Image (cartoon, rainbow, N blue to C red):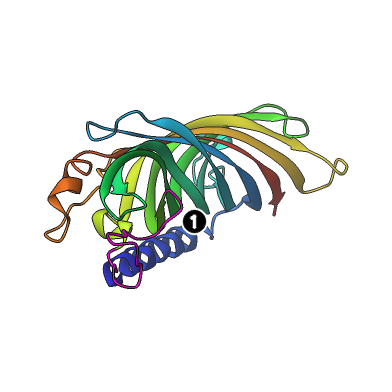
Amino acid sequence: MMIVSNKIKGLLVAFVLIFTHFASMAQFTTGGRVGVNFSNLRGSSVENSKMMVGYNVGVIFNFGLKDAMSNDLGKIMSIQTELSVQTKGATADYLTTNAEGLFDTLNVKESFTYVQVPILAKFSFGDRRGPKYFAEGGLFGAALFGLTVDGEKRYDHDGDTETDRRTYRDDYSGFDYGIAVGGGVTVPFGGRRSPWEFYGNVRYCLGLANIAEPKNETPDEIAGYLQDVKTSAISILAGLIYKF
């Protein structure tokens, strides 16, 4: 638990440093957004997986580069970082315990809750007084702070949760990272001088890390399900942004 907590703290510290670095730039934009994740798990240890629907809630911080870059690229490029809470996972085969407390392979929902921070290069095109279309790409880091398998947080080997303290999180890494690409549109509203814009976005995040992490205490029966597990997610997002 301490290791996972430190990873979450490290991710938040990195976010604050990135925000501080770009905060001095002009054309600062911020906002909030909500959406859904259509996620899945992949890898040699994942069998019979089906897409899972989850939530994605976060805040946006965008920093224009017009004043930092004198060329035409600076007019269309910005750096965007976000802080979000979202669920990823899948419905897949997993060796868990049945009603008698015995190991059994079941097709169950594995739900991972992450704090995620992407760093994206964003390229916007269009009339500044009308809709703008954008493409984005970059990297993301994510810290795990919640995991359930079939709605349960811990293994139950004898039907008594008081005697079985081992949690599913004990068998997974507290950190994920990967690449993110997407695109969308921003539409101003509220009049010509209004700083508000509507934000719509479709994004794909491909996890590159093996999030499974079998340890010495991991039962041999379960270790085979933890050799190679990676995340992926399609996010559909919408929100409001404010231009300073």
Q: Quadrant of the N terminus?
A: bottom left
Residue occupying the point 29% across, 62% down: 158
Answer whether residue 158 is magenta in the image: yes
Residue 84: x, y in percent?
52, 53
Q: Quadrant of the C terminus?
A: bottom right
Residue occupying the point 41% across, 54% down: 148
**Nearer-the-camera pick, 182 or 98:** 98
Q: Is residue 6 above or below residue 126?
A: below
Residue occupying the point 18% across, 52% down: 214
**Nearer-the-camera pick, 167 or 157:** 157
- The residue pinned by badge 1 equals 22
Label 1, secondary structure: give it: helix
Answer whether residue 39 is magenta in the image: no
Extreme residue toward the front, this view: 100
- Residue type indicated by callout 1: Phe
**Nearer-the-camera pick, 217 or 61:** 217
Residue 75: x, y in percent?
58, 35
Q: Quadrant of residue 54?
A: top right
Give left or right: position of 242 versus 125: right
**Nearer-the-camera pick, 95 or 224:** 95
The magenta segment is: 150-166
Give left or right: position of 30 versus 166: right
Q: Is residue 115 visible?
A: no
Extreme residue toward the right, this view: 191
Q: Is residue 130 above or below residue 146?
A: above
Residue occupying the point 77% across, 49% down: 195
